[in-house]
Image: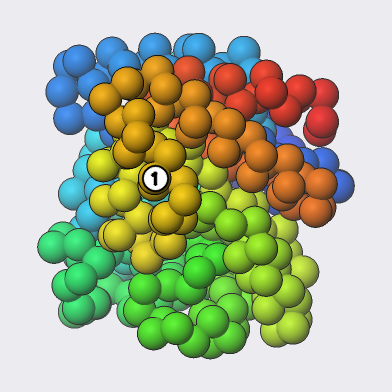
């Protein structure tokens, strides 16, 4: 029996890849594993509040350098066991040997998780630290895609970068070519880094098509709830934070409700443009909070727009 064959829950027999291939849109949420008891409480509060929205899937991240690996596997497995949600476990190449990667993949399978987001990942010091593969590990995320697919009946997703990966040095075509390589390795869908300009997303899709890839690329959305936090995230990811939006937010940055209202308004407009332009769905970076995402869902009339 292969690793992924242990999953028999009928709720999860249709994979995300199957869902998208059938022409359905995917609406999903991303969480991160908590570090404290209070963080754990907030995470599960968000999970339970978002569960009634019936997302296509939810994902749970790794920390930089795979630092939250055990917590990620535990939280993802608990979502599989205790909720009606379809969980996607993150997996990165960073600081992991092939043996360790196989162990994590086996842990996901044992927990009833049959979807994996395969990522190269950032070094423990963050994206500014030069990438260095584990001596007994993998160099690129397409290698990780192949490994996961070889070990069982998993549906694999990958990352995409509308403004280019920070290490692409502005070569957007090269970045799109590598995305196409990940699809050829067996990935069935991609989720993008967050961005603020819909045109950046549509240009990425066009570039990927030129390299022969028509696999679904789901845009990632991060509603602004904290001005300084989102600017730091944008700096780390290489995303451009629009000056006009920054000015609006800084004018009300001491009023949390006003900041969230602007964030919801801007994200709603972005989502409308993406869906109207043919995006195959939306992936929300929730930061383990549910309020903004639920408000955007209501504004968009989801899940009616599926």
From this view, report whether residue 96 is shown above or below residue 231. Answer: below
When asked about the image quadrant of residue 101, the answer is bottom left
The reply, left or right, for residue 2 in relation to residue 297 is left
Query: How many C-alpha atoms fall within 10 Å of the one at disc 1: few (<14), some, or many (≥20)?
Result: few
Residue 220 seen: yes
Type of colouring = rainbow
**Residue at the right extreme of this rendering:** 22
Residue drawn at 47 percent across, 41 percent down = 222
Quarter holding the C terminus? top right
Helix, strand or loop under label 1 = helix
Pick whichever, 177 or 195, lies toward us.
195
Q: Position of residue 188 (x, y in %)?
A: 66, 59
Residue drawn at 47 percent across, 50 percent down = 244
The reply, left or right, for residue 181 in relation to residue 125 is right
Q: Position of residue 38 (x, y in %)?
A: 20, 15
When asked about the image quadrant of residue 123, the answer is bottom left
The reply, left or right, for residue 301 in relation to residue 247 is right
Q: Which residue is mark 1?
A: 247
From this view, report whether residue 261 is shown above or below residue 22. Answer: above
Q: Position of residue 55 (x, y in %)?
A: 64, 28
From this view, report whether residue 93 is shown above or below residue 176. Answer: above
Residue drawn at 49 percent across, 31 percent down = 262
Residue drawn at 69 percent across, 23 percent down = 299
Q: Position of residue 281 (x, y in %)?
A: 70, 44
Residue 151 seen: no
User: How many numbered callouts?
Assistant: 1
The reply, left or right, for residue 73 in relation to residue 222 is left
From this view, report whether residue 50 is shown above or below residue 191. Answer: above
Pick whichever, 77 or 94, lies toward us.
94
């Amino acid at each position: 029996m292969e690793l992924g064959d242990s999953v028999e829950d009928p709720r999860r027999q249709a994979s995300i890849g199957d869902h998208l291939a059938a022409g359905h849109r995917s609406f999903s949420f991303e969480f991160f594993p908590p570090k404290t008891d209070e963080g754990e409480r907030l995470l599960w509060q968000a999970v339970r509040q978002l569960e009634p929205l019936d997302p296509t899937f939810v994902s749970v991240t790794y920390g930089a350098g795979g630092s939250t690996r055990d917590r990620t596997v535990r939280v993802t497995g608990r979502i599989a066991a205790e909720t009606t949600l379809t969980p996607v476990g993150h997996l990165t190449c960073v600081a992991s040997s092939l043996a360790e990667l196989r162990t994590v993949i086996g842990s996901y399978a044992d927990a009833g998780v049959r979807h994996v987001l395969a990522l190269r990942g950032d070094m423990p010091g963050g994206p500014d630290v030069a990438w260095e593969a584990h001596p007994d590990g993998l160099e690129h995320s397409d290698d990780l895609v192949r490994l996961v697919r070889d070990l069982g009946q998993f549906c694999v997703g990958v990352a995409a970068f509308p403004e280019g990966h920070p290490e692409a040095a502005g070569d957007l075509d090269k970045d799109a070519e590598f995305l196409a390589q990940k699809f050829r390795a067996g990935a069935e869908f991609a989720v993008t880094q967050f961005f603020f300009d819909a045109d950046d997303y549509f240009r990425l899709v066009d570039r990927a098509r030129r390299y022969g890839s028509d696999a679904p690329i789901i845009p990632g959305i991060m509603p602004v709830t904290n001005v300084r936090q989102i600017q730091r995230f944008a700096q780390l990811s290489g995303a451009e934070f629009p000056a006009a939006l920054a000015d609006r937010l800084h004018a009300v940055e001491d009023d949390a409700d006003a900041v969230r209202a602007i964030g919801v308004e801007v994200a709603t407009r972005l989502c409308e443009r993406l869906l109207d332009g043919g995006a195959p769905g939306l992936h929300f970076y929730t930061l383990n909070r549910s309020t903004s995402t639920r408000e955007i869902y209501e504004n968009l009339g989801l899940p009616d727009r599926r």
